[in-house]
């Protein structure tokens, strides 16, 4: 009975050891330069990562665009969507050797369906410290309205 | 991971970040090298120029970047990122003049320059033309 358990344990241990050996074999096989240069953050579904907030008067869209200057990004309203386009160019500098590359160079177009009716003329966008903030004032007819009750 | 300058493995929320009592994550980083320096570029969106704190202790460079305070935020309809601070550490290789490390922020990215010591800089010997006599 007891020996049976010991045998069972040993099987697991052997399998574990085998698994480790396989892992290690693949570690050696993968080209270190290739794995190193694959940006870790590419798994993100969409770039730039974006948050959308709602206030009483407006929708506020904030996107993280580190490395982008004013001329690298454009914001427009197309049909019922807010469209943000831009490009972050690679920063591999002349004469520099690359040791680690986690920041992706990327060209992007993000189309965000409008969360409600907005006043397209009043949309503003600012870029500060790599964060793009777009304020979309709600359309007048979409603002909450108080209806006064008259006594008859 | 780079063997020249490597991040020191540590869970999110380094000792540094804990001191600030704020959540932090490791920023994506590029590391470049030329004959004169190592150049480290990190994405730290939302961090103002005065929000960066760099410390060198022995052979460790600790980076902490603090976002500007956000006022009471309205409820989010969609959220793809958290407004956390950034914290990470690097092991500085030998041959870096740790007293001359400089940093600057630009458009939400942080550039850290780690100059090599004079002894390590590529020793280029200029071959001069003899006068011919």
Image: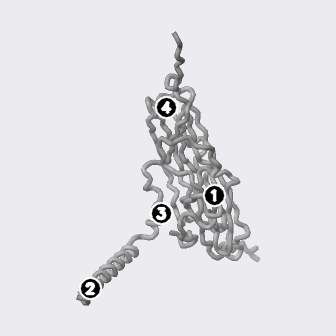
When the figure is inspected, residue B86 is found, relative to residue A136, above or below; the finding is below
Q: For the residues marked 1 and 2, what is the alpha-carbon distance in whole angstroms?
A: 53 Å
When the figure is inspected, residue B66 is found, relative to residue A5, above or below; the finding is above
In the rendered image, the residue lying farthest to the bottom is A3
**Viewer-closest of B10 and A67:** B10
Q: Residues within 10 Å of mark 2 (few under 14, many from 20)?
A: few
Name the residue tied to disc 2: A5
Q: For the residues marked 3 and 1, what is the alpha-carbon distance in whole angstroms?
A: 24 Å
In the rendered image, the residue lying farthest to the front is A152
Residue A37, labelled with which disc? 3
Name the side, left or right, on which B132 lies relative to A52. right
Which of the two marks, 4 or 3, is nearer to us in this view? Answer: 4
Q: Residue at x 45, y 38 (%)?
A: A112
Residue B65, labelled with which disc? 1
Disc 2, SS: helix
Disc 1, SS: strand
Query: Answer yes or no: do the residues labelled 1 and 2 have beta carbons within 8 Å?
Result: no
In the rendered image, the quadrant that contains the N terminus of chain A is bottom left
Earlier-in-chain disc, 4 versus 3: 3
Name the residue tied to disc 4: A77
Which of the two marks, 3 or 1, is nearer to us in this view? Answer: 1
Q: Residue at x 61, y 51 (%)?
A: B108
Disc 4, SS: strand
Relative image position of residue B92 (x, y in whole percent) = 62, 72
Query: Answer yes or no: do the residues labelled 2 and 4 have beta carbons within 8 Å?
Result: no
Q: For the residues marked 2 and 4, what is the alpha-carbon distance in whole angstroms?
A: 69 Å
Q: Chain of mark 1?
A: B
Same subunit, tags 4 and 3 = yes
Same subunit, tags 3 and 1 = no
């Amino acid at each position: 009975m007891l020996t049976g358990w010991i045998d069972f344990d040993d099987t697991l241990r052997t399998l574990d050891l085998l698994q480790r050996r396989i892992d290690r074999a693949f570690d050696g096989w993968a080209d270190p330069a290739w794995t190193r240069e694959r940006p870790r953050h590419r798994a993100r579904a969409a770039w730039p990562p974006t948050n959308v907030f709602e206030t009483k008067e407006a929708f506020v869209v904030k996107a993280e665009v580190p490395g982008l200057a004013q001329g690298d990004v454009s914001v427009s309203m197309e049909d019922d969507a807010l469209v943000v386009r831009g490009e972050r160019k690679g920063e591999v500098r002349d004469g520099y050797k690359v040791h680690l590359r986690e920041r992706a160079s990327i060209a992007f177009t993000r189309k965000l369906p409008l969360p409600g009716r907005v006043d397209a003329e009043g949309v503003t966008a600012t870029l500060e410290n790599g964060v793009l903030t777009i304020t979309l004032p709600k359309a007048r007819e979409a603002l909450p309205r108080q209806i006064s009750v008259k006594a008859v | 991971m780079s063997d020249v300058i490597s991040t020191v493995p540590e869970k999110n929320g380094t000792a540094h970040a804990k001191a600030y009592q704020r959540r932090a994550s490791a920023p994506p980083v590029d590391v470049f090298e030329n004959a004169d320096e190592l150049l480290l570029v990190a994405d730290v969106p939302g961090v103002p120029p005065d929000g960066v704190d760099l410390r060198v202790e022995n052979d460790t460079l600790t980076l902490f970047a603090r976002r500007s305070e956000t006022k009471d935020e309205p409820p989010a309809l969609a959220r793809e990122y958290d407004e956390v601070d950034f914290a990470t550490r690097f092991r500085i290789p030998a041959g870096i003049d740790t007293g001359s490390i400089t940093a600057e922020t630009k458009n939400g990215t942080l550039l850290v320059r780690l100059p090599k010591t004079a002894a390590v800089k590529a020793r280029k010997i200029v071959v001069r033309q003899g006068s011919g006599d």
